[in-house]
Amino acid sequence: MAETLNIDVSRQGLRDITGEVAAAVSRQADGDGVCHVFIQHTSASLLVQENADPSARHDLEQWLNRLVPENDPLYTHTMEGPDDMPAHIKAALTACSLSLPVEQGRLALGTWQGIYLWEHRHHPGRRRVLVHVSP
């Protein structure tokens, strides 16, 4: 059975959700398996990335914002603000789900790996992330 995490976001950018996902995994698993993580939104995404040096996250955010700028005159989907269509494009270029190994009831991430929710909109809100562990 999947567990839903309600993640509050305060701004655009990468938010570390490793602890929340790890806790959900520990409630669902006691052995080996696969953890499936899925975000139920089209303007945010999921990412496994370095969790040691914050400058790596900053550089990723800056690079993607440069790649997909706001207020591009080609956008026609603009009713929800200048950050909405870029958010959809950023989500399309990244991932809405992750598959992660579970060993002995715990996430088997590498030493410098963390799980991030990548919020692509500017305004605060709440995102739903499903976590499901399969044997």
Image: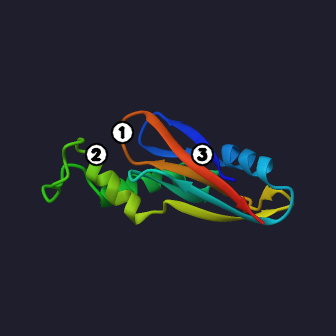
For residue 122, which numbered disc appears in the image? 1
For residue 53, which numbered disc appears in the image? none
Distance of label 1 from label 2 (alpha carbons): 7 Å
Q: Is residue 127 above or below residue 46?
A: above
Distance of label 1 from label 3 (alpha carbons): 17 Å
In the picture provided, is 50 more to the left or to the right than 80?
right
**CB atoms at circles 1 and 2 under 8 Å apart?**
yes
Asked which secondary structure carries label 3, the reply is: strand
Residue identified by numbered label 3: 16
Q: Amino acid at mark 1?
A: His
In the picture provided, is 129 more to the left or to the right than 74?
right
Residue identified by numbered label 2: 83
In this view of the protein, which residue sits in the foreground, 54 or 84?
84
**CB atoms at circles 2 and 3 under 8 Å apart?**
no
Asked which secondary structure carries label 1, the reply is: loop
Count of numbered marks: 3
**Splitting the image into 4 quarters, where does residue 98 fall?**
bottom right
**Splitting the image into 4 quarters, where does residue 63 fall?**
bottom left
In this view of the protein, which residue sits in the foreground, 1 or 74?
1
* Residue under the point 54% across and 58% down: 47
Q: Quadrant of the C terminus?
A: bottom right
Q: Which one is earlier in the sequence, the residue at label 2 or at label 3?
A: 3
